[in-house]
Amino acid sequence: MVAEDLPSEYVTHTQSYMVSKNCVVAANQNNLSSWQSNPIVLFENDELGDYVTNVFKIPQKNITVSAHRYDTLRQIATNQAHAAISDCTILKYYVNDSLKDFTFAMEELPPVEGAASADLVFAIRKDDTEMLQKVNSGLENIKKNGQLDEILKKWQQ
């Protein structure tokens, strides 16, 4: 989960195990190279509208919003949509799993200046300090011994 999204009255969070970035995805390198001058799709709850209009100067008329990443990615793969922007981890999940028979081009976007962090963490019940300590200790160990890097690489993160 993203640390800032957790209800702090009920849960606490572990140390971060990775930062999730935003990516733009298109059907091919040509579409990826020209995404800023063509219509794009953003996804509900990603809150990237201000980011793309302010940082990349995408006119509002070129932005549509979708609730369904899978359907939009299928539209991109079949050239019915030009490009989409969302969380890299989520996009990679679909591209490498249920849509692996299609070809996509993807690139990471620069971080959002002044925006909330996208540190990914585990949520732990607030009163379970023993579990929090165990998970944090485990995370520290797999970071130090390189296992976390291997896991992230395996899952293309």
Image: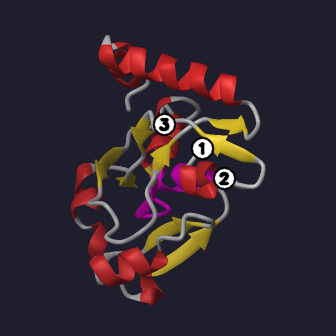
Is the C-beta separation of discs 1 and 3 under 8 Å?
no
- Ranked by sequence position, the earlier of labels 2 and 3 is 2
> Mark 2 or mark 1: which is in front?
2
**Which residue is located at x 31 percent, y 70 percent?**
113
Where residue 102 sits: x, y (%)? Answer: 45, 37
Considering the image in quadrants, where does the C terminus appear?
Answer: top left
**Which residue is located at x 31 percent, y 46 percent?**
105
Q: Name the residue beneath numbered marker 3.
A: 15
Q: Name the residue beneath numbered marker 1.
A: 1
Left or right: residue 137 versus residue 113 is: right
Q: CA distance from mark 2 to mark 3?
A: 13 Å
The residue closer to the viewer here, 40 or 128, is: 128
Whether 70 is drawn above or below 135: the answer is below
Where residue 111 sits: x, y (%)? Answer: 31, 60
Q: Secondary structure at mark 2?
A: loop
Q: Which amino acid, by three-letter code, is at mark 2?
A: Leu
Span highlighted in magenta in the image: 71-86
The residue closer to the viewer here, 141 or 39, is: 141
**Which residue is located at x 62 percent, y 29 percent?**
132
Whether 39 is drawn above or below 148: the answer is below
Is the C-beta separation of discs 2 and 1 under 8 Å?
yes
Counting other residues with Cα less than 10 Å from the Cα at mark 1, is it few (<14), some (14-19), or many (20 or more)? some
Q: Secondary structure at mark 3?
A: loop
Q: Name the residue beneath numbered marker 2.
A: 6
Q: CA distance from mark 1 to mark 3?
A: 11 Å
Whether 74 is drawn above or below 50: the answer is above
- Ranked by sequence position, the earlier of labels 2 and 1 is 1
Considering the image in quadrants, where does the N terminus appear?
Answer: top right
Magenta includes 156? no
Where residue 61 sits: x, y (%)? Answer: 46, 88
